[in-house]
Amino acid sequence: MRRAVECAPELDLKLTRLNFLGRFLRARFERLSRSEDLESALSVTARAVQLTSDGHPDQPMWLNNIAAVLRARYEHHGQIIDLEKGISSYYEAMKLMPEEGHPQMPTLLIKLGGLLTSRYERLGELHDIETTMTVLNRAREIIPDDHPDVPTLLYNTGITLYSCYQRSGDINDLESAVVTQKGALALYTDNSPNKLMTLDSLVRILLYKHQLFGELETLNDAICMSLAAIKLSAELNLEDLSRLIRHRSAFHRRFQCLGNLTDLEVSISIYHRVAILMSDDHPDKPSLMRTLGDDLYSHYELTRDLDDLEGTIAAQSRAVELSLDSHPDKPTMLDSLVNALLMRYDDSGMSDDLERAISLASRALDTLPDNDEKKPAFLSILGSLLHLRHQRLGNPEDIQNAISMQHRAVDLTTGSDKALAVSNLSDSLWTNNPETHILVFTRVLDFLPERVWLGYNVIQRYKESAKLHDLIKTAVATVIECGKLELAVEWLEEGRALVWSQILSLRAPFDDLSQQQPDLAYRFREVLDQLRDSAHRSLLPDVATGTLKDPGQIVTNTAADHHRQLAITHESLLSDIRACAGFEDFMRPKKFAALIPPPHTSSGPVVFINVAVSMIYDQACSALILFPGGLINSVALPELSPERADRLRSLWTTCIQRKVRERHTARVGLRGSSELGSLLEHLWTWIVEPILRELKFTANSVDGNALPHITWCPTGPLTQLPLHAAGLYEEECGPRVFNFVVSSYIPSLSALLRCQQLPNAQVSASGPVLVVTQPHTPGLPALPGTLTEGIRLHKRMSELQIPCTILNDDQATTEYVGAILSQHPWIHLACHGSQHLGDPTQSAFALFDGPLSLSDLMGTVADNAELAFLSACQTAVGDYQFPEESAHLAAGMLAVGFKGVVATMWSIGDKDAPIVVEEYYERLLELRRTGAIKKGSTGAAYALHEAVRCLRNEVGVENFEQWAPFAHFGV
């Protein structure tokens, strides 16, 4: 070919042959990686440019060729000068082309965008990524739809958008990156060499997106792309090893989300394959062995197969051996090996494993400076190990060093890294120093808004809050033991019912802000209103774990993305508001003084029952009694323990079984009434009786007078149990709580204050009332008693000239009820109810055309709402997975604005409900007419107390399963 170039008789022929020669040399370089071929290709293409006269039509093509060679040389040698010259060549080529219509212009723009992206990745200059987007957008404007470079253009645009997102954090860039790359993928054929590259890029972006938002659809999508990429890989090379490692992480992440053992085994299989093929001198081999060891350890935890544990130790030991002390992951490798040795020590008791673990942990600490963010965690690890050795050998020096390590860990934990405070907690509290406990627990509480982020969907927030509830209860028990009762109330409020607190905060008034910062207040209210509407729309559809989408399908969740963006805006506005003088604590957790219910609006004490023990003295569970005016008493509950509370809930679950799901047409006792009686007896002796004794509420003290009122606020397993029915029923005249007090429940103190303090909490004479009855809901058992219930209620309201809207059967659709709900201060729902065990926000009232769910109610505006009677079943039972969140319909009605709610804790009889309903409204209206209701109350608790007494007299006190389901929430 060189000879043919020299022999060419004409310039145009010489140029053509130079073009072919340059392409051949570059192709040989790509195959053999010989530098001399690359240099020759550069020389040939440069000569073609020199020989071309100005204005020659092929001059842009020669400049394009020289730019391509320069790019190849940059990628081979990494010299930035080649990158700069390549970019200049593309710009020069485009200047020589007509502005419109040149067929090569889209291709040149795409290639220029690629070089600009490379320069951005090398130098990090923002203007390069901005210029790249401009160039690629121009290419998209002029490129024909059938142009062969369209897939490459879409791929490059996706890469650039992802780079833009990493720089700006704009969610729209991330979503657009996925969309454009999927567009490229749909256009590539299976035999295209670029399809594998696009799949690999998509996996990387989708995994990052899942890490950011936790959406299962995104993870399933990434796994789909991984499977397609693995299928296209004909034979393995180093590039494919990297790809396999990334694909393994997709399966491992889904295992972490769903616990599917098959996903973990696929992850292990991929890593075994890579470990065999990767040489020991490969720089990634130590990290690979550590991760393989971690996977094997996870498999051991699920299967308890000792071979997995031995494999874990072997892999982790190999990782430590292969890594230099300067390796950035060396401390993590040592930590993984320490954990594996510690597990084998627990199983076998071999002291050699413990000694080796201590030595390795000390070695890890020696490699870390004090300002390293990992240092506190390793101090805790070594402290734990020294504590274990102290337990084994009794050496006082070990326990002193262990405590010293924990103190150093707390000291080195910065306020901005609150997650480390959580990891330090379990091992930093051996000391009996209360100040140490309070310091660490305070940091945990500070971390809550970040852990239970408002931008997550509701289910994710429930899951995140559930991880912290035991820790919060332990913190409360500890400060109670320290005598800091006001702090205990603050922490109970701050650490429980987190999701409801967030929902309530979206309705909170802020008059002072409106007066002093009207512009900020307007913008903040606008965002709050949008968040209130978007929170229930951000839930993801159910995704079957085994279902993988077509690789070309675009997966988006615009509602979730919109909600997250609103949450970000909310945080930004909060920061702006708190920067204003006088608003530094705006919407921060309230201090005790702001949590005290005003005496003139309080009808009695609030009783918190904390199911946890102190970390200092290991004392029993306790209750806090908050009196009107702010006095607090602590009551020890020596017979109650977390284990006993769990057993009570288990007994409760056995009692109600599936009968809690539906309202019944006949009076059917709960299976195992004797077990329920035993449960109520334990509630009395272990919990309620010691509290009433402390309050000096005895039969003699209340006889002949109106019963005092108690608002219960239990924690943990007790949130689902009927404290209002506790008592001794084997004895004919045994003590029962309803003979001493009138009971109400509240999910949080903030909810109680809101019910008491808002202007529309003032007692109105009555209604208007919305009555919904569902005697014949399609697909559910008939409830003829609800029709009787509605007729009786309508008749009585008409006699009293109280406006009453009746919706029966097909008149009560979800859309219509939702539309008129806010027009009625009182609402009565006589229908089936359901508790969604997997998704608490989908617990619902069964209307004629479908369920009216808690999720729907979250978006309901009901600022004038006052009273709700939920004559359905299971409306006051939350999800057992999230007991502290009170994720049930009764709490939901409080959250959307109702002040008092009557609900049920299990199945109610269709013939029992009308008795309670008629008597309840009769008593309620009587209290209203006589002015017996004080400010901040509704009278609902006392009205229900009397109504249930009437039912109890009719069915017999021993049939507590019929009268005890009814409970009152709020004021």
Image (tube, rainbow, N blue to C red):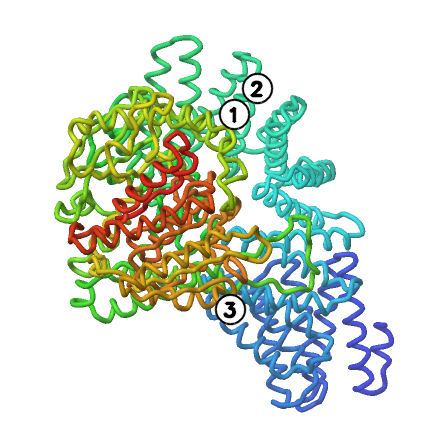
Identify which amino acid the numbered label 3 is placed on: Ile
Residue 600 x, y percent position in the rendering: 12, 48
Residue drawn 27% across the image and 58% down it: 508
Looking at the picture, does residue 900 appear above or below residue 192? above
Mark nearest the camera among 2 and 3 is: 2
Residue drawn 44% across the image and 62% down it: 563
Instruction: Name the image quarter holding the N terminus.
Output: bottom right
Residue holding disc 3: 129
The Cα–Cα distance between marks 2 and 3, rounded to whole angstroms, is 51 Å
**Where residue 338 is drawn, which disc sits there?**
1
Q: Secondary structure at mark 1?
A: helix
The disc, 2 or 3, on the residue closer to the chain's N-terminal end is 3
Residue holding disc 2: 344
Q: Nearer the viewer, residue 117 or 28?
A: 117
Q: Nearer the viewer, residue 617 or 366?
A: 617
The disc, 3 or 1, on the residue closer to the chain's N-terminal end is 3
The Cα–Cα distance between marks 3 and 1, rounded to whole angstroms, is 44 Å
The disc, 1 or 2, on the residue closer to the chain's N-terminal end is 1
